[in-house]
Image (spheres, coloured by chain):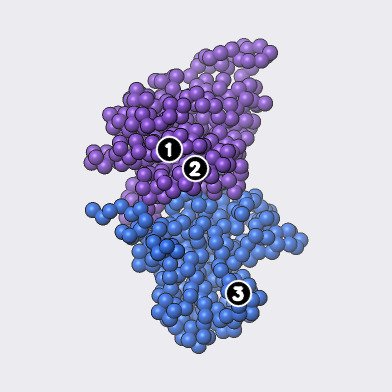
Chain colours: A purple, B blue
Amino acid sequence: MTDLTTVLAGVRFPNPVFTASGCAAAGQELDQFFDVTALGGVVTKSIMLDARAGRATPRMAETPSGMLNSIGLQGPGIEVFLDRDLPWLAARGARAVVSIAGGCVADYAGLASRLRDRPGLAMVEVNISCPNVEDRGQVFACDPQAASGVVSAVRRNTAPEVPVFAKLSPDVTDIAVIARACVDAGADGLSVINTLLGMVIDTTTMRPALAGITGGLSGPAIRPVAVRCVWQVHRALPDVPILGMGGIRTGLDALQFLLAGASAVSVGTTVFGDPHAPIRVLAELDQALSDRGVEQVRDVIGLAHGAAGQLVPEGPDPVGDEPAPSPGGTVPDLEEP
Amino acid sequence: MPVQVLGDVLSVKRVGAYQSMTVIAPGIAELTRPGHFLAVQVGGPESSMLLRRAFAIYDVKDRGVYGGTVEFVFAVHGKGTAWLSSRRPQDKLDVVGPLGKPFRLPTTGVNATLVGGGYGSAPLLPLATALRERSCRVDMVLGAGSADRLFGLLEAKRMAASIAVTTDDGSVGTPGRVSDVLPAVLDKCKTDVVYACGPMPMLRAVAGLCSERGIPCQVAVEESMACGIGVCMTCVLPVIGDDGRTRMARSCVEGPVFLADRVRWDDVGTVPHDTVGALARP
């Protein structure tokens, strides 16, 4: 039995598998299929201050091993969320990671203060992949200063014991620069990555397939990009916890993210094809870790950065009576079962 | 409550231009009502096609030699449905259902006219059975592009007090659209309620005709879906709520059956400016 407990910026979660923002609503729909409290946490769809109708349809196009979406942050607004969704998650006993989105720094600050001291709030995830209405629609996540402004406003308005994670966009020249800006502004951790900007043209209508023209690409197609980003951010900021996501479909996919440096993972787009995906990924990850003789999940976080053949490159000595594995000796083969 | 079942394919039959597939899916059949739909995984567990395909449930058998079975009808449109059509008995198929809100049934025996376009007739056939069990008179109007695209004509003839058929090419029935013959049917059959399923332009025309006559109408819409369970927010359309305000409603969980006069037909595909949460027009 592997100890699956993971700690994100001082907050303990029973396991490292979460839902992903925008892929699980606020948990109730998936709870019909499996017990959402069995997950490490439920990351909610990004909530805004006011109700938002979102974009016109078509909002979605399937792509090879992925999908493109342009929903436009449809949602009921923070008040309905606080009246209806967060109390449900709290009553259910789920650990809610509330994703917030806005068009200016004041929106984010307002959202954080509305969330402050609400029961059930385990963590805040700041969706900074939104256009800044005060800066010609420039996306916060693509500018270190803009990202920093949002993160510090959220951090200031959030209870000290509640971690604030900034969700990074991969559509930047150097993700480590943005990561550092967010951490310097007070982010306790980083969610890596949001979707990649993409586009599909319908060859029958000869026009863009999405009403919003461009959309966010997600799914297994982006997994290698996501693993690379987690790797780069962990390398640049090894002490900053990462919630990793991007195309996770199986437990071994999740393990890649942990090995790259994530302390926990979110399962997103795969849910659309398999409503049981998060709980299945958790079971598969648990199995994969015990197959590899891993006693605690934190032993594999960032492990891929160590020298080949070394099971635990850094961190405390393994607990328990088992002797530390000798280099090269006990690493099981890593082929897929 | 929907369930996810990895079922065995029992049969795949060609029916005119369509395919009809029956899957052994215990747990789904028992809960299904006419108008419910299934979300079907395509391409197998390692598929590069991530999104489920949604199909109205045609027939269910909740007991028998194979336990619960569920049958749906589809047309081969792309790679996903082509893969489905190549399934053979005993192949595994991952299905989620029953999903959505089914048709609401009248509590007394009324005159019901059922309007189906193409394989949109599939959910109307079990609906006809349910209505007849409630002592309703059932009349049917079926339309399609051509004769091979009419689904369930024989079965409809057995159940309906009257049936009108149209095809675009005139290969069978009256040449034209269901909306060409529907007014006469509504008058002749003294229709109290209308149920419709088919392509959006057809539903819009049927909704308009019913609205002119003050006949309540329920429609099962076809919107492009990614998940079918209410989490992806892609299958939305503008629908007027009980409070009179328009919202972008998810057709998978708030539909697929809507009261026709609640759907903003002229605005489908857009976000009307008076929708709750619509951005101010520039």
Outermost right residue? B65
* Residue displayed at 46% across by 34% down: A117
- Residue B239 vertical placement versus A103 (above, below): below
Label 3 SS: loop
| Residue B182 shows in the view | yes
Outermost bottom residue? B188
> Which residue in the structure is indicated by mark 1?
A115
- Residue A288 vertical placement versus B80 (above, below): above
Label 2: few (<14), some (14–19) or many (≥20) C-alpha neighbours in 10 Å: many
> Which residue in the structure is indicated by mark 3?
B107
**Residue A242 image position (x, y, % from top left):** 46, 27
Cα–Cα gap, marks 1 and 3:
46 Å
The disc, 1 or 2, on the residue closer to the chain's N-terminal end is 2
Q: Is residue B31 left or right of residue A79?
A: right
Disc 1 + disc 2, Cβ < 8 Å: yes
**Residue A140 image position (x, y, % from top left):** 31, 35
> Which residue in the structure is indicated by mark 2?
A86
| Badge 3 and badge 2 in a common chain | no
Q: Identify the amino acid type marked 3.
A: Thr
| Residue A225 shows in the view | no
Q: Quadrant of residue A169?
A: top left
